[in-house]
Image: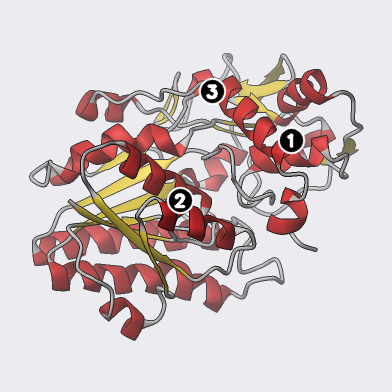
Amino acid sequence: MRILITGICGFVGSTLARALVASGRGHTVMGFDNYLRPGSETNREPLEQLGVQVVTADLRNIAQMEALPAADFVIDAAANPSVLAGIDGKTSSRELVDHNLTGTVNMLEYCKAHRAGFILLSTSRVYSIAPLAQLAIVAEHDAFRPSPLASRLPPGLTAAGLDENFSTGAPISLYGATKLASEALALEYGETFGFPVFINRCGVLAGAGQFGRADQGIFAFWINSWLRQRPLKYLGFGGHGHQVRDCLHPRDLLGLLEQQFAAPTIAAADRIANFSGGAASAMSLKQLSDWCAARFGPHRVVPDGTPRRFDIPWIVLDHAKASRLWAWQPATPTTAILEEIAQHAERHPDWLDLSSPS
């Protein structure tokens, strides 16, 4: 199988590339990157040493996409992942749309030309912000969770988290909208031109080598910053750090991807599914701080109740559909992911400066 990975030198792309090579299934793994993310350039040489073909290219450039070698499947791991992109003064709204949506169209045209399957790594941020922001919550053990006393939960919210029936209505942020639009276009392209498409909505992806910025991955950012005694704040929600996210290592997607490579005839309704660490992996910032304090020693976190656009207090994905369709379960517990990040941070004392320059 010839596998092309977009954003192959990013954290998720490079992790999946290494996992595919290590699987021993004889895949030809290749990919491209534009190296806009600080730190991504460090992944190129190690991948090439594994026999991975890495091309310098930008998915917004049609000519460069047309010049790529043919593949049997594309894994789209390239995106601006910040929920504040387009409004934070660092990236314009047009740049965000060009990268996350126009880039997807270019890859779908590539799949059309080469009859390649397409796997979009989407996000939990396609789910509607308003019902999550208005959700009745309680704080227990320094972490938010939906209130057990709530008389009515929004449709699609189960005891295990948000399932695929939860609302995707606006607002979902400009970032979330580009991913949701990419999902719709991918499914339409697949149906129209007869190639397999899968939409994998992932929870927070985390692991060693993730870049040291909050928008790239809060777990890696927090651990690296704690170890280096960099300033940290609990933003919004009273400044207590009770906001909760789930956690998934991208290598846990490998078995799923192998199944998707071999299952092009799956029903259209089953092409979208959540993949996350689920409730068992969920952790608040305060709980993450407690873990860091036990691992590295004390560090002060500044309470700051200032709200930010698009922030939500709790989001955990229910992956029951993925388990039913693919017999899939996350394999790496959150504590193992955190320890992996911590050991990487200890081995790379310059990681924050390298991957998150001021």
CA gap, disc 3 and disc 1: 23 Å
Q: Where is residue 104 in the image (x, y as percent from the top left)?
A: 35, 67
Q: Mark 2 points at which residue?
A: 14
Give the residue pinned by disc 3.
281
What residue is drawn where x is 57% and y is 28%? 337
Quarter of the image for residue 349 reads top right
- Of the numbered discs 2 and 3, the one sitting upstream in the chain is 2
N-terminal label among 3 and 1: 3
* Location of residue 159 by image quarter: top left
Dot 1 crowding, Cα within 10 Å, few <14, some 14–19, many 20+? few
Cα distance between the residues tagged 1 and 2: 20 Å
Relative depth, front residue between 174 and 89: 89
Pick whichever, 148 or 152, lies toward us: 148
Horizontal and vertical percent for residue 129?
55, 46
| Residue at the disc numbered 1 | 346
> How many other residues sit within 10 Å of disc 2, few (<14), some (14-19) or many (≥20)?
many
Camera-nearest residue between 141 and 218: 218
Circle 1/circle 2 CB separation < 8 Å: no
8 shown above or below 219? below
> Looking at the rendering, which quadrant does residue 206 occupy?
top right
Mark in front: 2 vs 3: 2
Disc 2 and disc 3: Cα gap in Å? 23 Å
Q: Are marks 2 and 3 in contact (CB under 8 Å)?
A: no
Work out whether 239 lies above or below 86.
Answer: above
Under circle 2, the secondary element is: helix
Quadrant placement of the C terminus: bottom right
Q: What element carries label 1?
A: helix
Q: How many marks?
A: 3
